[in-house]
Image (cartoon, grey):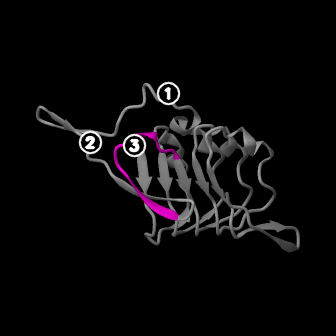
């Protein structure tokens, strides 16, 4: 499986650890649900988000008889704008967990996803700090930490960061 898009489905509960077994995931969009708990540290098992060989990157395609066609399309949100992807969908690497109730620390393992292009964790309640080595994410062009309430001891620190 390369695309997991379950946005706006009113799912609730913890992220299942089995999600980390889907190492070929390129797009994870679980935004606008009622998911809670920690983001699993095994997030770095998404090997398609760790490195990308653009020469070997296979297109998302279908075969019908003798014909091969590229039929996969996806509406994805990046930098707050919805885009329709089709022919370059195989090049997109995105995680959107916004508008949920995640807490705990942002796992430092997320920073090993060097091929990730867009990370949206906005509108959640995390503790701790943004991982120090977030700059190691070489392909990132969009990180959204807008309206994250980084909980500390007995008070809330409101953090807004979007670029």
Relative to 122, does residue 143 appear above or below in the rendering? above
Q: Residues within 10 Å of mark 3 (few under 14, many from 20)?
A: few
* Pointer 1 or 3: first along the chain: 1
Residue at 60%, 45% (x, y): give it. 43
- Callout 2: 10 Å neighbours few (<14), some, many (20+)? few
User: For residue 23, which numbered disc appears in the image?
Assistant: none
Q: Residues within 10 Å of mark 1 (few under 14, many from 20)?
A: few
> Toward the viewer: 95 or 117?
117
Residue 39 visible somewhere in the drawing: no
State the residue position of label 3: 88
Q: Quadrant of residue 110?
A: top right
**Of 4 and 118, which appears nearest the observer?**
118
Q: In the displayed structure, would residue 143 be above or below residue 157?
A: above
The answer to whether residue 44 is left or right of residue 87 is right
Name the quarter where the C terminus is drawn. Answer: bottom right
Q: Nearer the viewer, mark 1 or mark 3?
A: 3
Badge 3 element: loop
Give the structural element (helix, strand or loop) at label 1. loop
Residue 91 is one of the magenta-drawn residues? yes
- The earlier-in-sequence mark between 1 and 2 is 1
Q: Earlier in the sequence, mark 2 or mark 3?
A: 2
Residue 88 image point, x, y percent: 39, 43
Instruction: Give residue 70's mark.
Output: 2
Residue at (49% x, 27% y) in the render: 53
Q: Which residue is mark 1?
A: 53
Query: Which residues, given as a range, are shown in magenta?
Result: 81-93
Q: Are marks 1 and 2 in contact (CB under 8 Å)?
A: no
Vertical placement of residue 55 versus 97, above or below: above
Q: From this view, report whether residue 92 is shown above or below residue 10.
A: above
Cα distance, mark 1 to mark 2? 20 Å
| Image quarter of the N terminus | top left
């Amino acid at each position: 499986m390369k695309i997991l898009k379950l946005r706006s489905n009113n799912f609730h509960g913890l992220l299942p650890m089995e999600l980390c077994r889907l190492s070929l995931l390129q797009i994870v969009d679980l935004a606008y649900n009622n998911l809670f708990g920690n983001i699993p540290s095994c997030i770095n098992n998404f090997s398609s988000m760790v490195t990308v060989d653009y020469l070997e990157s296979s297109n998302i395609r279908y075969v019908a008889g003798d014909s091969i066609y590229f039929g996969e399309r996806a509406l994805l949100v990046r930098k707050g704008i919805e885009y329709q992807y089709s022919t370059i969908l195989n090049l997109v690497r995105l995680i959107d967990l916004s508008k949920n109730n995640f807490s705990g620390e942002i796992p430092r393992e997320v920073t090993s996803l060097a091929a990730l292009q867009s990370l949206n964790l906005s509108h959640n309640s995390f503790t701790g700090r943004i991982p120090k080595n977030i700059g190691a994410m070489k392909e990132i062009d969009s990180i959204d930490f807008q309206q994250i309430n980084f909980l500390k001891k007995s008070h809330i620190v409101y953090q807004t960061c979007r670029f």
